[in-house]
Amino acid sequence: MAKIIASVNCSHVPAIGAAWDNGKAQQPYWAPIFNGFDFSKKWIADLKPDVVILVYNDHASAFSLEIIPTFALGCAPEFKPADEGWGPRPVPVVKGHPELACHIAQSVILDEFDLTIVNKMDVDHGLTVPLTLMFGQPQEWPCKVIPLAVNVVQFPPPTGNRCFNLGKAIKKAVEAYPEDLRVVVFGTGGMSHQLQGTRAGLINREWDMRFLDSLVKNPGELAKMPFIEYVREAGSEGIELVMWLISRGALNEKVREVYRFYHVPCSNTALGHLILENER
Ligand SMILES: [Fe+2]
């Protein structure tokens, strides 16, 4: 049977992708950020997952204001890097896992989650930057990737509780899949940041740390936090953090914290990174 073994949470700041693609990864500004993922690269290379379910948000690349799905699951065999204005990132095409993705869609929709099934979708920095941080620049990505795009751009986003419960439904679906697959769920976005208005550049380190602690130890309580607290404490784009509750919901109640990294500044955000494993 398939099994979810771990989660990886990290920011997906677009400037990270641009820095990597333009050979700036070891410049003084960027080196501490990329070095913060040295452990993670080795950890995931040793773990060798078969499939990553990558929770991220689309930034008006695949979807526009014409169609705004709350949860969009990529069921296609492949997903091309999106052109976000400077041409597509020079990274491998993302290979999907249509059989597992369709199985998850069927299971969670019948569990009353209204997923949108997407059979064609370009994937933007929200998905490709976490892959770069974790895998560097291989010829091909070393595992299949199922994209799960969540609307956190246009109000109203899904609640943390809805995200947490969707994670649990995904866990149930994966565990009912008959093939022996080892699955890791990525939750991306955040941490505290605000890109516009008088509070642009907002960083709330204390709040970010409390969020990380709660995500590890007390996600059920964290899931009750209302939308407005994310916005007030973590900035308007801090709402991306609800996506970390999907990856957390997909794990067991008790988890082992394997690695944590936090760095300010990354572009104008606080970069957070957390690896959790199910207790074995
Ligand atoms: Fe984002």
Image (spheres, rainbow, N blue to C red):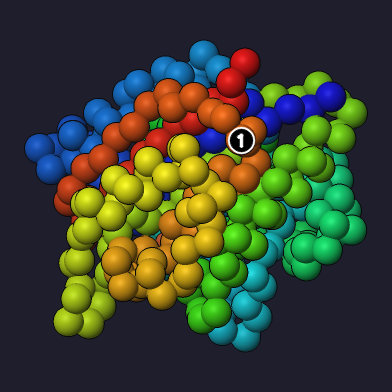
Q: Is residue 257 left or right of residue 173?
A: left
Q: Is residue 264 left or right of residue 182?
A: left
Tag 1 residue: 253
Q: Quadrant of residue 133?
A: top left
Residue 268 x, y percent position in the rendering: 20, 60
Residue 5 x, y percent position in the rendering: 63, 26
Residue 254 x, y percent position in the rendering: 57, 30
* Quadrant placement of the C terminus: top right
The amino acid pointed to by label 1 is Glu
* Quadrant placement of the N terminus: top right
Q: Residue at coordinates 49% horizontally, 43% vertically from top-left?
A: 218
In the depicted structure, whether residue 35 falls above or below residue 155: above
Residues 87 and 98: in front is 98
- Total marks placed: 1
Q: Is residue 229 left or right of residue 113?
A: left
Q: Is residue 8 left or right of residue 208?
A: right
Q: Residue at coordinates 35% horizontally, 21% vertically from top-left?
A: 39
Residues 3 and 72: in front is 3
Q: Residue at coordinates 81% horizontally, 54% vertically from top-left?
A: 108
Residue 65 in view here? yes
Instruction: Please state the quadrant of the image where ligand 1 appears.
Output: bottom left
Residues 79 and 233: in front is 233
Q: How crowded is mark 1: few (under 14 residues within 10 Å), some or many (20 or more)?
A: some
Q: Dot 1: what SS?
A: loop
